[in-house]
Image (cartoon, rainbow, N blue to C red):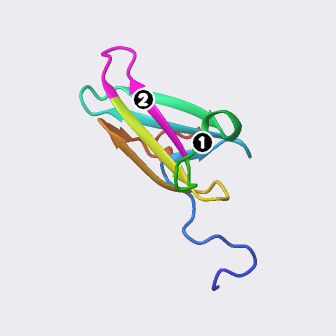
Amino acid sequence: MFGLFGKKSGGKNPNVKQDDAHTYRVRVRTKRHGEIVEFRFTKSAHIGLDDDGNYLFRKAVVSPQYFDRGELLVTFDKRYNVTATTGEGVDFVPVSEWED
């Protein structure tokens, strides 16, 4: 109720899975051939700052079989909560489709 008691509003992003406090995973499907590519990234090694002070993970996508190309972008707030997922040449695969 009203965001009291530490409850986060908005919930988790359906396209990004957080494995632990520092590690995230995302899967994308290429638009051209529908090939699925998974990325694993961490706060310390892969997430950076843009000129406006926002946290982001930007990655070029090249599928292993057909060499389809694209790009994905995951943006975060100051507490590393995912705020948006966008891509060119790819569609994000929701975590509910691939979660163990």
Q: Which residue is drawn at the image coordinates 55% and 41% (left, top)?
A: 99
- Residue highlighted by disc 2: 60
Mark 1 or mark 2, whichever is nearer to me: 1
Q: Is-magenta flag for residue 64?
A: yes
Q: What quarter of the picture does the C terminus occupy?
A: top right
- Residue highlighted by disc 1: 48
Neighbours of disc 2 within 10 Å: few (<14), some (14-19), many (20+): few
Q: Residue most toward the front?
A: 51
Q: Which residues are magenta?
A: 56-69
Mark 1 is on which residue type?
Answer: Gly
Give left or right: position of 2 versus 58: right
Q: Earlier in the sequence, mark 1 or mark 2?
A: 1
Instruction: Examine the rendered structure and indicate whether residue 81 appears above or below residue 20.
Output: below
Q: Secondary structure at mark 1?
A: strand
Q: Position of residue 93 (x, y in %)?
A: 42, 41
Q: Which residue is drawn at the image coordinates 71% and 82% (left, top)?
A: 4
Relative depth, front residue between 46 and 2: 46
Q: What quarter of the picture does the N terminus occupy?
A: bottom right
